[in-house]
Structures are given as structure tokens and as C-alpha cells.
Image: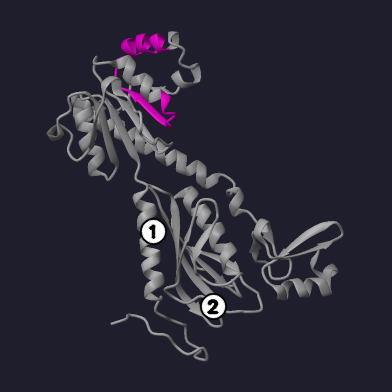
Amino acid sequence: MPALRRLSDNDPRPQFRILGSEMLDDFLKRSAELAAAGERFATATVVRSQPPTSGKPGDKAIVYPDGRLWGWIGGGCAQPVVIKEALKCLADERPRLVRITPSTDDPEEGVVDYTMTCHSGGSLDIYIEPVLPRPHVVILGRSPVAQALARLAGVIGYAVTVVAEQLRAEDFGDAALLPRKNFSLEGMELSPRFYFVVSTQGEGDEEALEQALAGHAGYVAFVASTTKSRKVIEYLRQRGVREERLEHVRVPAGLKIGARSPQEIAVSILAEIIQVRAEALAQAEAAPAPAAARGARDPVCGMTVEAGNARYRSEYRNQSFYFCCAGCKQAFDQEPGRYAL
């Protein structure tokens, strides 16, 4: 039995409706395909509405990293706001509840408020959540530290791939195994979300570290003593590996917590990866909004409008103004001096 029912358009209570089964199937299918492909995207779901609004609870949309929106969460006033907050959500990896309402005089903690003074009126509460690939730890080597790290990273939900020759599945838990000569990463689609750990323990140290540095990952750690690491890095320098890449290597691998056993060293490495991730997210949160998330302000209603895709615009005193709807444009054109402040 459906959990939601649709009220008449004249009912003053919040509006609820069932998302059409066909559209829901498409949404679930598209989301599953993107997630399976390791794509980053955000989902937006209308969780509450007050009439008159075109968006109703259960309406859903997908927002891509380039600012495209698929699905339905309401009309022209809601979409630019959802896109803006969804791109922020992808940057800082934090969900948010967005409220678009004619009045924000009574803000609530944990709610991102936007004022809607469009002619349509009404209000919407929209929950926006990032869907992100799991952090991926790539371990080059089959040493005891590599085995412990593969198991620990898997326990906390990271994706793990182990690259080496003569690998045994029972040594690495649920990690994906990539038996390769010379630690070749050919065919792997690498990204900054990959964390490389070289733990070869004398079995092809130079080849493994060179492969890890070729991936341009945000984190490359080498499990080795200071003396050993200097020799390996100097060898790679002589082979022409760029200095800025060599300086990127974290050695000795892991946080300095006095780790001694393979298991403790694995813990210190995983802690360092967690720390690196947290620092990157903090920087993303403090950074300016992505270009696609920035927009122009409708001078009439105050809504954010994506200038590049704005359907309604006017020129006044050699300046461009963008509007969320025809009504705002009409109001501006009648009294431009009132709004062009």
C-alpha cells in the first residue's frame, strides 16, 4: 500500500503524492548505474512542501558534477538552488536540508534557508545527499604490512586493490587482487581518490614506487626505513622521475605513533589516509563554490539563477540581469531603476 497520498490542490495542508512508478524506476536505475560506474553525483528529494508549489514530497532528481539536473524537484525557482547546494554537497561531501520559503525570519539549526518571493509562492524542503565512490586504497606488495592494511581498510568500508605477483586470496581478506609483473597498473582508471601504499619489503621497491608515482594520486606512501627510501628515491630521480612527484612521497609511511608490528604500522597508515581525507574535505568546504554552482541573483525575487542557462534576462545601463521566471523579468522591465541597485 502506498505510504503517501495526494491531496487536492485546494487543501491547505502540506502536499504529498506518490512518485510515478515509472519515474521512480528510472531514478533508481540511473542512480544504480552511476554508482556502479564509480561516478560522483548528488540526489535531491522533496521531503515537504506547502502549496502552491509544483514540487511535492517524493519528487526526486539527480545532480551531476557539471551542474546538469535530471528528474523533478520543482519549478524554475527551486532548480538553481538545488543545483547550487548539490555542487557544494559534492565538494564537502556533506548532506544538507534546504528550505525554500517566502520568509526566513525563523531559521532552524541544520537547515539551509533560501527566500522565495516568486509569484508561485509556497515553500519546499529538499534533502540533498552526495553519492560518492568509496575511497580506494591501492597496495603494491604482499608483505605482512600489506596484508594487515588490506584487511583493516576493508573493515572500514574502503575499496582495496592489491597489486603484486603470486598473490593468495586468503592473505588479503576481501580485497581485489591484481596479479601483475613489475606492479603494472595498466588498465586501471586512477583518480585523486586513490591512495597508494608501497609495501614491497625489498621485492621490487623501485618498480612499485615508480608505478605509484605515475598515477598522480593524492597520497603515495612508502613503507621503508629512511635509509632505504633515500636510495630508492635517488634511483628514481636518476631515471627521470620529476622532483615534484618524488617530494610527494610520504616516508616513513603512516602517522608517527610509535607503531612497530605490521598490524600497528597498518593502523598508522590508515590513520594517515583518514587524516589526509579530512584535510582535503576541510579545504573543499572552505573553497569558493564551484563555477557551475555560482549564479546571478534575480534582482526582483532574490533567487539564485544560473546565468549561463537563464531563460529570462534583460539589459539595463550596460549590465545584464537574470530572472527565474517571466513575471520577475516583467516586473524589472517596468521599473528597472527600482531593482537595479
Q: Percent from the top left, x then y, of residue 241?
A: 45, 16
- The amino acid marked with disc number 1 is Ser
Label 2 secondary element: loop
**Colour setting:** one colour
Q: Which comes before the other along the chain, label 2 or label 1?
A: 1
Pointer 2 residue:
54
How far is the residue under mark 2 from the one under mark 1?
Answer: 23 Å
Q: Residues within 10 Å of mark 1 (few under 14, many from 20)?
A: some
Q: Residue at x 51, y 51 (%)?
A: 65
User: Does the magenta run of residues contain 188?
Assistant: no
Side of 125 relative to 187 (left or right): right
Quadrant that contains the N terminus? bottom left
Q: Nearer the viewer, residue 112 or 34?
A: 34
Residue 81 numbered mark, or none:
none
Q: Percent from the top left, x then y, of residue 161?
A: 27, 35
Q: Nearer the viewer, residue 216 or 152?
A: 216
Looking at the picture, does residue 302 appear above or below residue 209?
below
Residue 31 numbered mark, or none:
1
Side of 95 relative to 143 (left or right): right
Question: Do tag 2 and tag 1 residues touch (Cβ < 8 Å)?
Answer: no
Q: Is residue 251 shown to the viewer in this render?
A: no
Q: Residue furthest left?
A: 170
Q: Which range of residues does the magenta coloring cover? A: 214-236
Q: Residue at x 42, y 85 (%)?
A: 6
Q: Nearer the viewer, residue 96 or 58?
A: 58
- The amino acid marked with disc number 2 is Ser
